[in-house]
Image (cartoon, grey):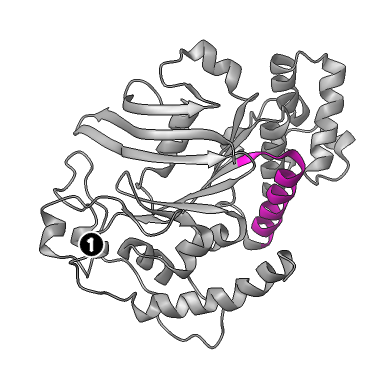
Amino acid sequence: MTKLLEVKNLEVSFQTYGGEVRAVRGVSFDINKGETLAIVGESGSGKSVTAQTIMKLIPMPPGKIKGGQILFNGEDIVPKKEKHMEKIRGKEMSMIFQDPMTSLNPTMKIGRQIMEGLIKHQNMSAAAAKERAVEMLRLVGIPMPERRVNQYPHEFSGGMRQRAMIAIALAANPQLLIADEPTTALDVTIQAQILDLMKDLQSKMDTSIIFITHDLGVVANVADRVVVMYAGQIVEMGTVDEIFYDPRHPYTWGLLASMPSLDSDDKSELAAIPGTPPDLTNPPKGDAFAARNPYAMAIDFEQEPPMFQISETHFAKTWLLHPDAPQVEPPEAVKKRMRKLASAFDEPRLVKEGK
């Protein structure tokens, strides 16, 4: 597979009154053309900062890329000036933000907002851009697009505004689409429609997608591979099957155990990860998750673990994978969740693969 994006040893910090916040600490991953990569983690894990840094949208200052590379089609964009990035954004890579009501311009018609990027990046005439805007609204499932193209954001429902955001992001056929929690503000029915829409559009346009979310239920439906972040670092990465059916990091176990179950027979209490994430103005010595990890060993408080390789595609940053570490099984709540996921997702996957 051809790599579209490679992030290597990315370091991002923010200067605040309380000191330097090390928001992203040595993050490395890649995404292939046509692939969907999900980045998951709780609030403050660094996933959104990582996504915005790829687009070079973090405010500088107070933000600063302190190290690493972001290779897009083999070219490092970290040293590129804003003028160069303006040519890439919208045309080569686009972003769907969490809340469309704050991302869309309330004073500008939806059609005009789609047309802006087409006129700038594709050198289209206004008439051709408007025709494309109508086509995009139709493509994302908005009814009566010829009329809707002349309406303002406040005239759209929440789900329709998110569809309009997707239309804006995909209008210029970008190679990379970054979706930063695009379904958080939507109810579950509309959320499912938006996710189905994104998968459908990806298959039609062969776009690579980085999907930022804290919802592992969403990940199971959309991702090919998963990156789990904690305290500004990647703690586990692998294919969606490896993360859901063979998780190795205690933090991933905690995320899986905290997923709510829709099974009426499941009377167990919802599990929670104890404690809070560390203060990244002064990152802890050793494993950042040690203080919240019920399986932590003495070495976790003294030395940061390396990234251990489990398979060709599966890696986890935990001392539990060291040959001398005690054998620890995932907690029963995680095993139960894995069995539920297997029964929920195995059959559709086998049908899809024609088995």
Q: Name the residue under label 1.
A: 322
Foreground of the two, 155 or 278 = 278
What percent of the width, then of the height, locates residue 309? 35, 55
**Please, is residue 288 above or below residue 153 in the view?**
below
Work out whether residue 75 or residue 42 is closer to the camera in this orientation and state it: 75
- Residue 87 in percent (x, y) is at 60, 16
Report the side of 240 relative to 21 (left or right).
right
Residue at 70 percent across and 36 percent down: it is 153
Q: Quadrant of residue 10?
A: top left
Nearest the eye: 41 or 355: 355
As shown in the figure, which amino acid type bears the numbered disc 1? Answer: His
Residue 202 included in the magenta stretch of the image: yes
Per the rendered image, the range of residues in magenta is 189-208
Q: Quadrant of the C terminus?
A: bottom right
Q: Which residue is rendered at x = 62% and y = 38% of the image?
A: 33
The quarter of the rendered structure image containing the N terminus is top right
Numbered marks: total: 1
Q: Eyeballing the image, is 201 above or below 136?
A: below
Category of crowding for the residue at label 1, using alpha-carbon neighbours closer than 10 angstroms: few (below 14), some (14–19), many (at least 20): few
> x and y percent of residue 176 in the render?
60, 34
Q: In the displayed structure, does residue 173 sit left or right of residue 12?
A: right
Element at badge 1? loop
